[in-house]
Amino acid sequence: MKIIWQIETQVDPAWLSLMQTAADCALLSEGVMRPCAVSVRLCGDEAIHEINLTYREVDRATDVLSFPTVNYPEGVTAGQADKLLRREYDDELDACMLGDLILSVPHVLAQAAEYGHSPEREAAYLTVHGLCHLMGYDHIEEDDKRRMRTMEEKILSSIGQTREGEASVTDETLLALAKKAMERSYSPYSHYAVGAALLCADGRVFQGCNIENASFGLTNCAERTAMFKAISEGAQEFTTIAIAAQGSAPWPCGACRQVLNEFAPGIRVIVTWDGNVDEMNLCELLPHGFGPKSLE
Ligand code: THU
């Protein structure tokens, strides 16, 4: 999912990566194959209050507001509305615009404290709730409410954010997230797009893609992009990395094996390409590796 961010109130970057993962998983869970986009605005209570009053005639601030572009017929959601989605195709975005989400940052912080979980988890929960609305779900009738709740749970559990907070990201989800990250690759020189999805011990997933440079030598691989994002946001324990490409098996290059070895010498490495999947442990990919222990 392409997210057009409008950030008026600065937040921890961990929010944004979890929200991106949640958005990718929302499309996967709903079975939307078409590239989609959403605009996400993070603002204060005053701004969301004004929008609530102007567009909904509700005179108070709230946690999340969603404005869908698609007018789904009764009982139809995005997964069954390919034709309707196609009408929202935007040339410039190269994606179908699902609509706008507005989140109140003060509400996210207050609700996270109230429920005793992290603000990024609350931000992801509200993103999933809002995205369900943008995909045609609602919670007016009991039946609809149940269907929406089931989809929310499906999306949240696919990113390891179940109610119990346990990590339950499956290999299937991780591989799908690596493929989504591959779509964001910047590889105009090699035309070899790579995506990675790195699963942390705490259930967070960080995605990365390869980022090339006109100077060639400054290219960053997908795996290291994901690793550096994770480490800079406080994660240091990793269990699995999924890597996706097309045309050949994207086993990590030597530099990436070395960087993975620094933090996770026993990490599972799963690769996927052209419908194939293969797996190895980093110990097998980097035998007798030089790491922190070598300096003890
Ligand atoms: N690449 C990766 O992203 N990961 C690897 O482990 C191998 C190579 C990228 C770097 C470059 O953008 C392109 O693939 C061709 O080398």
Image (cartoon, rainbow, N blue to C red):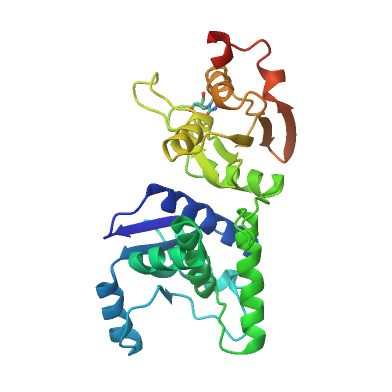
Query: Residue 259 location in percent, x, y?
Result: 52, 22
Can you say whether 275 is above or below 146 in the image? above
Task: Please count the marks in the image.
Answer: 0
Rendered-image quadrant of the C terminus: top right
The residue positioned 64% from the left and 45% from the top of the image is 174
Query: Residue 208 location in percent, x, y?
Result: 50, 38
Q: Which of 47 and 137 is in front in this view?
A: 47
Is residue 31 visible to us here?
A: no
With 94 as the anchor, is 262 left or right in this view? right
The residue positioned 53% from the left and 31% from the top of the image is 223
Query: Residue 71 location in percent, x, y?
Result: 49, 81
With 4 as the anchor, is 202 left or right in this view? right
Q: Nearer the viewer, residue 202 or 25?
A: 202
Is residue 257 visible to us here?
A: yes
With 220 as the anchor, is 243 left or right in this view? right
Q: In which quarter of the image is residue 285?
A: top right
Q: Quadrant of residue 57?
A: bottom left
